[in-house]
Amino acid sequence: MTKTTAAIIVAAGRGTRAGQGLPKQWRKLAGRPVLAWTLDALRAGGVSRLVLVLHPDDMDRARSLDLSGVTLVGGGATRTASVRAALDVLASDPPARVLIHDGARPFVSARIIADVLAALDDSPAAAPALAVVDALWRGTAGHVGEPVSRDGLYRAQTPQGFHFAPLLAAYRAWPGDAPDDVEIARASGLPVALVAGDDDNFKLTYPPDFDRAESLLHARKPAMTDIRLGNGYDVHRFGHGDGCWLCGVKVPHGRGLQGHSDADVGMHALTDAIYGALAEGDIGRHFPPSDPQWKGAASHIFLRHAIEMARARGYALGNCDVTLVCEYPKIGPHAGAMQAELARIMGVEIGRVSVKATTSERLGFTGREEGIAALATACLIAG
Ligand code: MG
């Protein structure tokens, strides 16, 4: 049978040593209150029944939190009084196990939570801790005094986990205050198993702790780069002429391409790919064929407009790839010049621009040499 688990988050303290004039659990970390991160961390560890103990003055602030599965409880004057109030609330529908966690430890990992719960299979209580590695001294009036052996010394963390019934009994038998719940459990004879803590599971206390917390969150943030792809497709038919404008290069040929502008089918496909990446329609939207001023226009006007629109929105061209589909003229000998011209027009390195060609095996309108088709892909990267 699955054992039910609840977590008590103790967050009623008034500690303002962390700065901003706010209790530290309400200070913002990456734009959200510390407590929002702590609740997320417990949920990520699989605990969905949460009791959040707040100072009565902070109840309004709780509206900024995701309170799904959360019971709010008004805290007492001390940590012990706050936990006692939360245990009393849980006692009406007691869980099998309870975790008690500091609201100002937002980086508790799912691993620690799992280890504490696993330890509760064999022990009525368990707590994460880290062995002390630094040398310890007693200090007296600003001077180093007696060394203290660090053997067997641990730094306590939370969540501290307990079988609910014996912990409730321990609290009811404990008259006063205690620095943490382990002390109350031990006083009633409960053995407490040690579980490995984690350096990142630190308690936010002083201003530099918030700098550390911000960099931890930054390091964990998944890449949020805005990458956009667009595709373009265009066709122009052959007509009279002595060559075709293709990707900004006039390629000698017994015929030309017909169109409203210079009919540069490759550049049109590429321009549409960039507009597509920006969700800005196609060339026709920005340069309507009904407008006589674009008759015979050089297509670099369109391409430059699209790439400048991308730049204005904060995007750079990652790369682009144009494929021309025709039997003739042969593109291969001109592909390098086309890449160079597209790169020049867009103001990017030539290595980001690809131009290639294929035939259609004499099939279809391109195979019958009625016209040329072009496909293009453009990748825009924010930043
Ligand atoms: Mg066109």
Image (tube, helix red, strand yellow):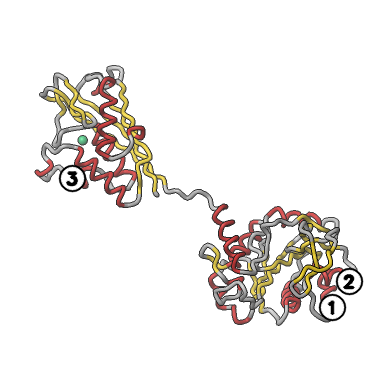
Look at mark 3 in the image and give the residue it sits on. Answer: 287
- Residue that lies at the very extreme toward the front in this rendered image: 143
Q: Secondary structure at mark 2?
A: loop
- Ligand 1 resides in the quarter of the picture at top left
Look at label 3 and name its amino acid: Phe
Q: Is residue 310 left or right of residue 124?
A: left
**Badge 1 local density, few (<14 within 10 Å), some, or many (20+)?**
some
Residue type indicated by callout 1: Trp
**Location of residue 157 in the rendering, given as x and y in whole percent from the top left corner:** 74, 63
Q: Earlier in the sequence, mark 1 or mark 3?
A: 1
| Image coords of residue 187 (percent x, y) | 88, 72
User: For mark 2, what is the residue?
Assistant: 188
Residue 141 on image: x %, y %: 76, 75
Q: Nearer the viewer, residue 125 or 200?
A: 200
Residue type pointed to by label 2: Ser
Q: Nearer the viewer, residue 370 or 43?
A: 43
Q: Residues within 10 Å of mark 2 (few under 14, many from 20)?
A: some
Secondary structure under tag 3 reads: loop
The answer to which quarter of the image holds residue 62 is: bottom right
